Amino acid sequence: MGKTRYSGDNSYFYMFIGEYKHSIDNKGRLAVPSKFRQALKGGAIVTRGLDRCLFLFSQKEWEELAQKLIALPIAQANSRAFIRLMLAGAMEVRLDNQGRILVPDYLRDYSNLSKQAIIAGLYNRIEIWDEDNWKQYKDKTEASSDEIAEKLGELGI
């Protein structure tokens, strides 16, 4: 994980990258990769993600996302649904002395987390996947990578 200075101030942004495999114990504790721990030492938020994974945010990133979410129009059903997905499912977590977080039962159920988890760094957030779900998702995405790249090319990426 890299550390980058925000422009114009003295704070740092921690960049999450990489893919790691960790076990989940019987109590639902999951070790966070040591490279990610510094960014999460002030607290973190775990919530329902998309594609049946969990999102793990640093406190700072969560606050920025939450502000964007609450600004969405509540008169639109899709906005309300997404706000509920993200905010109602959120739980504050802290790293224990061994660098683990406790993933609540309802989030383990949502993401089908069993014994092995994949922790994927995605720049400003971490995704937590059940190992089998990650493999299926990754295989499907890799098989259609040319098509995905072409569509992103249309967007100027």
Image (cartoon, rainbow, N blue to C red):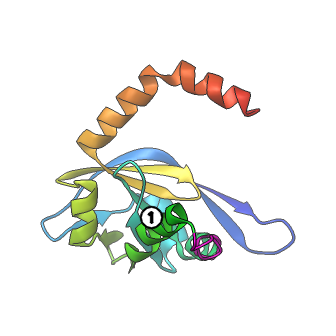
- Per the image, the residue denoted by label 1 is 56
Residue 20: image location, x then y, percent: 38, 47
* Residue at (42, 58) in percent of width and height: 49
The answer to which of 86 and 29 lies nearer the viewer is 86
Q: Position of residue 98 (x, y in %)?
A: 31, 71
Residue 76: x percent and y percent?
A: 56, 66
Q: Quadrant of the N terminus?
A: bottom right
The image quadrant where one finds the C terminus is: top right
Start and end of the magenta stretch? 66-75
**Label 1 neighbourhood size at 10 Å, few (<14), some (14-19), many (20+)?**
many
Q: Residue furthest right?
A: 8
Residue 3, image quadrant: bottom right
Q: Residue at x 34, y 51 (%)?
A: 52
Q: Is residue 121 visible?
A: yes
Q: Is residue 88 magenta?
A: no
Magenta region includes residue 72: yes
What type is the residue that disc 1 sits on? Leu
The part of the image, by quadrant, that contains residue 46 is: bottom left
